[in-house]
Structure formats: structure tokens, C-alpha cells
Image (spheres, rainbow, N blue to C red):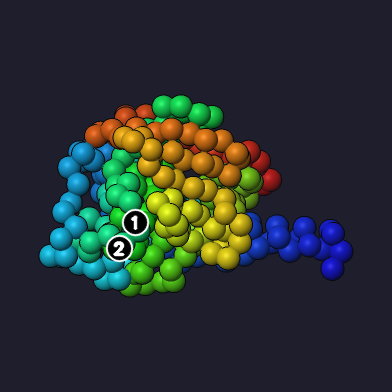
Amino acid sequence: MTLIGAFLLIFWLGFLSARPPLTTDPAALAGDGSVLNYCELPQLDGSGKQAEDIAKGNTPGCAYSHFPLPILAECTEPLPAGAEDIRGLWHAVEGAHRGHVERVEQCGSRVVVTSSGIIHDYGPNSSAGLNTNDTEGAVLFSVGARDFCMRTSASMIWEEGVLNFYAFGWGPKVVARYLEGDQMVWEYLDGSINRMERICLLPEEHKIPAPRGRRISLF
């Protein structure tokens, strides 16, 4: 395969291939996750649903329209050995992505990260595979009313207290999250190291995600 052929294949897979089916609970997408107190976390005591009982969450299109309700709200499965408890709402206070806000949910070996219009959900569920299967969120171009953003897939694996993200589940490590004292360190694929602190309420400016990407209008 020529270099141009390889580029076209990657472009087609990333931007033109069929989008993953939306499996997120419609009630979670319709609800308002900005009104919750994320310092009040559910007890993981096994009294409710298991992770595998709940449908997989993923990004609707290229972004959700407003900050949704938690995907794992009814899940109470205890965390497995080796997993740190990083649940809650986090605000980046240091690093290249200072100001970034994300919600982390955990239940059993499942982890859901919601931020900036996207929902990444890894782990056992009732509707799809283990790996995240959605989009990156940044719109490269639009054709009419349809936006095109890159497909993504990753695993989230706990290794010695670090939650590592591996592209496609078998590729290189692209993101890492881990605790240092009361802060969470977020190592992003651009090489940045960002320090985050817990907050209880979603800042108003993060309720509706800001448009991302070059957003080139073709037609």
C-alpha cells in the first residue's frame, strides 16, 4: 500500500466510516447533570445494579448538547482490587489544559469519563464491547448539517495505581490518570501533565460544551 493509500484508509476509518450506534440511556442524555453535587458519591456496597447490567454510554454524534446525568447512577458494584477511587468532578488547576473539567464515574471495573461534549465508557456493560467506542469530539469538517469528527476507541486499564488508556485496546498508551495526594494527575496525549482538584458543582460555563475543531464547511 502506498503512503497516499494508507492516509486515505486512515482518513476513511477515522472520519467517514459508520458511526457507532448510540447506546447511552436516553434519560441520562435528556437529564441535567449540572445540578448534582458531585461531592456526594454513591456507596459502592453491592446493593444495586452491577456494571454489566447498565447499557454502555457513548457520545451522541460529535458532542452532547448539555452536560448529561451520570451513566452509572444506579450502579453499586464495589471497585476491584488495584483500582483507585477517582470518582467525582475534577477541575484542572495546573498544566496546559488548565480550566478543563471532567466527571469520572466508576463501578466495578467500569470507568466513564464525561467532559467537553464527549462520553468515554470502558468496561463490562449490557449493550456493547468493553472498549470505548465513540468519537473524539473535535469537528474537522461539515457537509450541510452533518458534522464529521474522528472515531475513537480505547481501553482503560488499572496498572499499579495508574489508569492507563490504550488506543484501540491494543495500541500505544495515550492518556494516564492517577492520584497524588488530594489531586489527580492527568497525562494527556499531547505530552502535557495536568493537575486536577475535586469540585462539587459543575461551573456554569461547562454546562453546554464549547464547539471544538476546525469546523470547515464544505457545502
Query: Who is closer to the viewer here, 120 or 39?
Result: 39
What residue sits right under mark 1 in the picture?
83
- Tell me where residue 33 appears, x and y as whole percent: 27, 44
Residue at the far right: name it: 2
Helix, strand or loop status at disc 2: loop
- Tell me the amino acid under the disc marked 1: Ala
> Residue placed at 33% from the left, 51% from the top?
84
Query: Who is closer to the viewer here, 106 or 161?
Result: 161
- Tell me the amino acid under the disc marked 2: Pro
Would you identify the image quadrant in which residue 129 lies? Answer: bottom left
Q: Is residue 129 above or below residue 67?
A: below
- Tell me where residue 113 appears, x and y as whole percent: 39, 50
C-alpha distance separating marks 2 and 1: 6 Å
Q: How many numbered tags mark residues here? A: 2
Q: Is residue 44 above or below residue 88?
A: below
- Tell me where residue 83 appears, x and y as whole percent: 34, 56
Q: Please tell me how crowded label 2 is: few (under 14), some (14-19), or many (20+) other residues with Cα within 10 Å.
A: few
Instruction: Assess whether mark 1 and mark 2 are in contact (beta carbons under 8 angstroms).
Output: yes
Residue 23 in view (yes/no) = no
> Residue placed at 49% from the left, 47% from the top?
176
- Tell me where residue 193 appears, x and y as whole percent: 52, 35
For the N terminus, which image quadrant? bottom right
What residue sits right under mark 2 in the picture?
80
Residue 218 in view (yes/no) = yes
